[in-house]
Amino acid sequence: MDQITAILDRLLALHPREIDLSLGRMERLLDALGRPQDRLPPLVHIAGTNGKGSTTAFMRAILEAAGLKVHVYTSPHLVSFNERIRLAGRIVSDARLIEALDTCEQANAGAEITFFEVTTAAALLLFAEEPADVLLLEVGLGGRLDATNVVDAPLAATITPLSMDHERYLGETLADIAAEKAGIIKRGCPVVIAQQPDEALEVISRIAGRLGAPLQVFGQDFTAFEENGRLVYQDEEGLMDLPLPRLFGRHQIVNAAMAIASLRAAGRLPAPEAVEAGLVSVDWPGRMQPLTEGPLLDLCPPGSELWLDGGHNPGAGITIAEVMAEQEERRPRPLYLVSGMLKTKDPVGFFRPFAGLAREVACVPLTTTDAGRDPSCLAGSAREAGLAADAHGSLSDALAHVRAKAAADEVPPRILICGSLYLAGEVLARNGMKPV
């Protein structure tokens, strides 16, 4: 066991038996650390159900293309915990991470604290110690009581599309979830939000109005669309004619627009040349990612397309199915899903948009967590959503099954591995991904 894993395991043991979302434990630890949250670079705070990671990735790429130093905090990681923390453009080194985690462990002195809280404290400590031009701070869960919500006066708050997820902690309605996400809005702080269902938009608008926070809404105050193979962004400042994003899917046009609008609201939008460079250089693994090389391709039928996405809720299911439908229109191929999911997710809601689009779902266990859904139960949920489905003991078994089933197809298949970021991490690790 390496040193980082040993420390993380010790910190995980401090986790309360029941998660009660609260800022009390976080504030106690940060006080013991000398309040690093008061010494952070200017920051943009990002919340949402879907798309917040991609939106953050676009902002980082645009800012770095302009030559700025950018700290970034995201979660969860795919292959290495270090991925969660970027210091001035580089994933945190083992040595810096160990030092920060050790400092937080000592300052916490054995008190109960959630894993996310103590690791977020370590990230804030690192961000306070090294200068940067901008910090992109992504929320972990919710917003109002999230461990990141200890910051005052961000440059801007960003809320990406909302859908049902984490209902146990955030509420049983979209209005409840919107109220939790809108908890990152601070008095007078500009707020940029994606197009939302009416009940969510009403809640966010009311909270922003109460706090005197200027609100900009996608589709009302700014927009973006594809035209002649280009991305056209428009707001009250005018039009920007830009290249299409490197990331696949129409939803990435929205995420790119959210990034541009957020940076403009924050007063940090660079020249158009940097925006262009950022859109074509952005990288965000595990989100509609085509896998074009690596050992997993050898397990697929020759000539196959292999795709990976870690989306795991009904909203993500709709978005991912739309991307697969676009690919089907451009180049028809039989679509097979290989899927694993957490017990806490809604598999029927996730799979339902694929009915009539995917041939079959091969359901697999999650190997890097004990919280995965049994493949047989997952297959039952897929069948309830209108899909043919079977359970398999491993990712390799599932791909072998697809290989056998696709042997009778006239063209090689399109295979989408989906349903969990844990599964995405396993795939990328097996396929040789090294975080950079």
Image: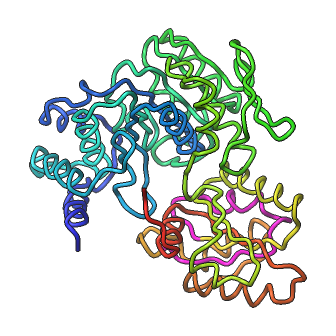
Q: Is residue 16 magenta?
A: no
Confirm whether the magenta stretch covers residue 359.
yes
Residue 377 appears left or right of 233: left
Q: At 40% from the left edge and 40% from the top edge, which residue is drawn?
A: 72
Residue 391 to residue 117: above or below = below
Tell me what residue is drawn at x 73 percent, y 52 percent.
Answer: 318
Colour convention = rainbow
Q: Which residue appears at 62% of the width and 29% of the height? A: 273
Q: Quadrant of the N terminus?
A: bottom left
Q: Is 25 placed left or right of 276 in the picture?
A: left
Q: Which residues are magenta?
A: 340-366
Residue 414: image location, x then y, percent: 76, 71
Direction from residue 104 to residue 86 in the image, left or right: right
Does residue 45 lie above or below 113 as drawn?
A: above
- Give x and y (percent) for residue 412: 81, 79
How many marks do you count on the picture?
A: 0
> Which is more toward the observer, 298 or 103?
298
Across and down, in percent, residue 6 comes to 20, 66
Measured along the vertical axis of the image, is residue 433 above or below residue 317?
A: below
Q: Nearer the viewer, residue 82 or 204?
A: 82
Pick whichever, 152 or 274, lies toward us. 274
The answer to which image quadrant residue 288 occupies is bottom right
Q: Position of residue 130 (x, y in %)?
A: 25, 35
Q: Quadrant of the C terminus?
A: bottom left
Q: Nearer the viewer, residue 111 or 238?
A: 238
Where 135 sits versus 190, above or below? Answer: below
Residue 236 location, quadrant: top right
